[in-house]
């Protein structure tokens, strides 16, 4: 099922709570209690454009996947993906 992503953020979100990203990764990856990620595990990489779509990326310690924020219906959605080779930094 294709999700209704938007190409651009209507406004770059300033209220992204890193705790939401941490919780998403810990739940999605079913990480054991003693190995739980915390906010210090994530490093802000910036706003990028990938194939005409804006994305905000965070790297994750000891992982190849990144946290990514995508514009979605005048808000945003949190996902994880590999950092794309064709990403162009915007800020």
Image: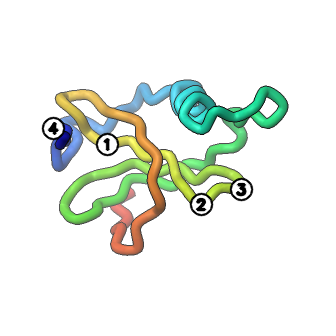
Disc 4 element: loop
How far, Cα to Cα, is label 4 from label 2? 26 Å
Task: Tell me: 50 left or right of 4.
Answer: right
- Judged from this view, the residue extending furthest toward the bottom is 85
Above-or-below relation of 23 to 90: above
Of tags 4 and 1, the one toward the viewer is 4
Instruction: Indicate which disc, 3 or 4, sits on the residue closer to the N terminus.
Output: 4
How far, Cα to Cα, is label 1 from label 2? 19 Å
Residue receiving disc 3:
62
In the drawing, what numbered circle is on residue 4? 4
Above-or-below relation of 86 to 6: below
Instruction: Indicate which disc, 1 or 3, sits on the residue closer to the N terminus.
Output: 3
Of tags 1 and 3, the one toward the viewer is 3
Q: How crowded is mark 1: few (under 14 residues within 10 Å), some or many (20 or more)?
A: many
Residue visible at 40% across and 48% down? 56
In the drawing, what numbered circle is on residue 64? 2
In which quadrant of the rendered view does residue 89 lie?
bottom left
Residue visible at 54% across and 34% down? 28
Q: How crowded is mark 3: few (under 14 residues within 10 Å), some or many (20 or more)?
A: few
Of tags 1 and 2, the one toward the viewer is 2
């Amino acid at each position: 099922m294709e999700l209704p992503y938007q190409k651009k953020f209507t406004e770059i979100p300033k209220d992204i709570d890193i705790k939401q990203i941490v919780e998403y990764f810990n739940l999605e990856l079913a990480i054991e209690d003693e190995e739980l990620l915390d906010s210090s595990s994530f490093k802000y990489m910036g706003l990028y454009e990938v194939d005409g779509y804006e994305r905000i990326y965070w790297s994750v310690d000891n992982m190849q996947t990144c946290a990514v924020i995508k514009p979605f219906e005048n808000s945003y959605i949190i996902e994880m993906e590999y950092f794309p080779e064709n990403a162009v930094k915007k800020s």
